[in-house]
Amino acid sequence: MAGIYNLKMFSKNSRQAAIDDFNVAVLIPCYNEELTVGQVIADFRKELPNAVIYVFDNNSTDRTTEVAEKAGAVVVRERRQGKGFVVQSMFRKIDADIYVMIDGDSTYPASDVRRLIEPVANDEADMVVGSRLHEGSRGSFKRLNLWGNRLFLSTLNIAFGVHLNDILSGYRVFSREFVKTVSLIGGGFEVETELTIKALEARFRVVEVPVNLTVRPEGSFSKIRHFRDGLRILGTIFALVRDYKPLTTFGIAALVVITAACIPGGIVIDDYLRTNAVLHYSCAVLAVGMTLIGGLLFNAGLILHCMTRRIREVEYQIRTNLIADHSTGREKARRQAG
């Protein structure tokens, strides 16, 4: 993975950018957040007075939409249940230069938003992650959540050979080029993992900025189901490793199978060395069969690796053309407005 992305750490000393010159959209996915969404909107309105704030309601059964509208946000409804579907809808429907995505639970500080926007505004990043697990952060994590985050983080870092600090943060800033070219599939809480992996594999520039996580206000509850959503996140990581690194995936499987074939093969060899005859024909058949399966797995990985590489080249060209089209369209619109 080295060399296909730029990973930096931005601190509070990062240089200022002319953020107010950009069309900024604040995107807030919500499901039953009536206790907190009003405060989130107010906090971000204070920090980004020129931004348009959107609340994407995901079938809330409380007064989330009423509170959001009263606070001055534009409310958009997404009927497909799941945060991933909400993010897909956000990216498809909203047009802006810079996108800020923030959970509606009031656990992320709005005061840090300009530090997160700066790398994108300065054209130094395509996705900025508000890292809750960075050494410069202070987080109010429950023990189970912390263990889960570290498990997923370690799995991804090992699989993709990177050194990220937080892959599940709901506090992110995106460039227009990223939003309009990334393709999302997951419909649930695995969306942050998918965003991170696809950003790395598509060679987008990823930046982490330390932020502090606060506790939810009393009466507000997390919507994450730890066991079910944890399995979905792990499944997403493994599925994307298989899709983006088929040679590694099938190569490891081939190595495991061929190594296991050494057990029955060793028995056959031991028989032959001692008696000059094959006494365990079943072991011989098993060893040969497992070796052939291992070879087939490796060949499958090699073929898929070549196909994936070609597909990436095509996707890169398509993305480059889309970015050029978007840039040309924005320039024309600005000239007409001027």
Image: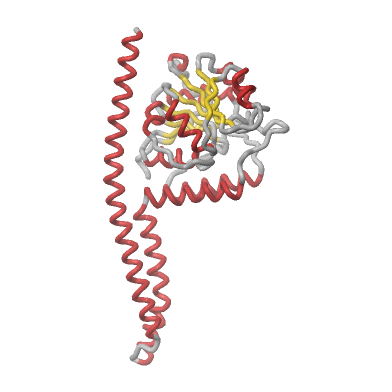
- Give the left or right position of residue 209, taking residue 310 as reference: right
* Residue 156 % position (x, y): 47, 47
- What's the coloring here? secondary structure
Q: Outermost residue, bottom direction?
A: 275
Whether residue 336 is visible here, answered yes or no, is yes
Whether residue 165 is visible here, answered yes or no, is no
Q: Outermost residue, right direction?
A: 218
- Give the left or right position of residue 180, taking residue 74 as reference: left
Q: Residue at x 26, y 45 (%)?
A: 310
Q: Residue at x 38, y 49 (%)?
A: 243
- Give the left or right position of residue 194, taking residue 212 as reference: left
The image quarter containing residue 288 is bottom left
The image quarter containing residue 104 is top right
Q: How many marks?
A: 0
Quadrant the C terminus occupies: top left
Residue closest to the eye, 316 or 74: 74
* Residue 158 % position (x, y): 46, 50
Q: Is residue 52 above or below residue 81?
A: above
* Residue 334 % position (x, y): 34, 13
Q: Outermost residue, top direction?
A: 338
Residue closest to the eye, 44 or 248: 44
Residue closest to the eye, 213 or 67: 67
* Residue 255 % position (x, y): 38, 64
Quadrant the N terminus occupies: top left
Q: Residue at x 56, y 46 (%)?
A: 229
